[in-house]
Image (spheres, rainbow, N blue to C red):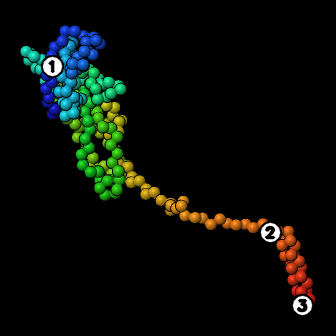
Amino acid sequence: MAQQATIEAESRDNTGKGIARSLRRAGRIPAVLYGRGRDPEALSVDTTALTRLLTQVSASTTLVDVAVSGRATVKALIREVQRNPIRPSDIIHLDLYAVRADEKVTVEAPVKLVGIPEGVRNFGGVLDHVTHSLSIRVLATDIPDHIDVDVTALNIGQSIHVRDLSFDKFEVLSDGGTTVCTVVAPRAEEVVAPVVDAAAPVEPELIRKVKPDEEAEAEAEGKEGTKEAKKKE
């Protein structure tokens, strides 16, 4: 089931970039609440409270109660959190989509892999989690925190694709050929070459050039040796 949270909001009449900047300077975030069958409504929410909330829930799958002073709460989804491109930690606008209990909505739900694959447990394979979220269509009250995918039967070289999945409470809209996860063969161990100590001295090979007089002397000795050998014969 979807997580539940509450956002305290205030209605505002003025809109525009100047008003938005003034709100942010005052510690509030401009927001808009819209939905099927209702006109968009300009709101503002406390910056600190919203920042804290977004660290505690998954924005894409959380159903929030939008509480505007003096009115009944409205259930909504957080459709978009706009952030400063230079300082991503700074929120500059919030989009809320009002929903009804009997209305189906499209959300991005995170994928959670469950179990240890056969190929990992017994053959040293590696589980590669390829797709981390899936687009689903579901009743607003049945939005899951995450989608469980059982991987225990996977062996090396086997994969799970979107077309292999089926669920009772929601429809998966992502392309059927999308790979969710796969088990790959263990990587071969690298053979590490011996490290040569660059600091160790290396004796250079010396090649001495033979001087002309030494060369002549060696040639003469060679001729004398040949003469002596002939005499002995």
Q: At 70% across and 66% down in the image, what residue appears?
A: 206
In the picture, which quadrant includes the N terminus?
top left
Residue 99 in view of the camera: no
List the residue tagged with mark 3: 232
| Three-letter code for the amino acid on which mark 3 is drawn | Lys
Tell me the mark number nearer the camera, choosing from 3 and 2: 2
List the residue tagged with mark 1: 9
**Whole-percent x and y of residue 136?**
25, 30
Vertical relation: 202 (above or below) 137: below
Who comes first in sequence, dot 1 or dot 3? 1
Instruction: Classify residue 126 as left or right of residue 59.
Output: right
Kindly identify which numbered label has been placed on residue 210: 2
Q: At 24% across and 19% down in the image, what residue appears?
A: 24
**Whole-percent x and y of residue 151?**
27, 46
Q: At 24% across and 10% down in the image, what residue appears?
A: 15
Residue 107 in view of the camera: yes
Helix, strand or loop at label 1? It is: strand
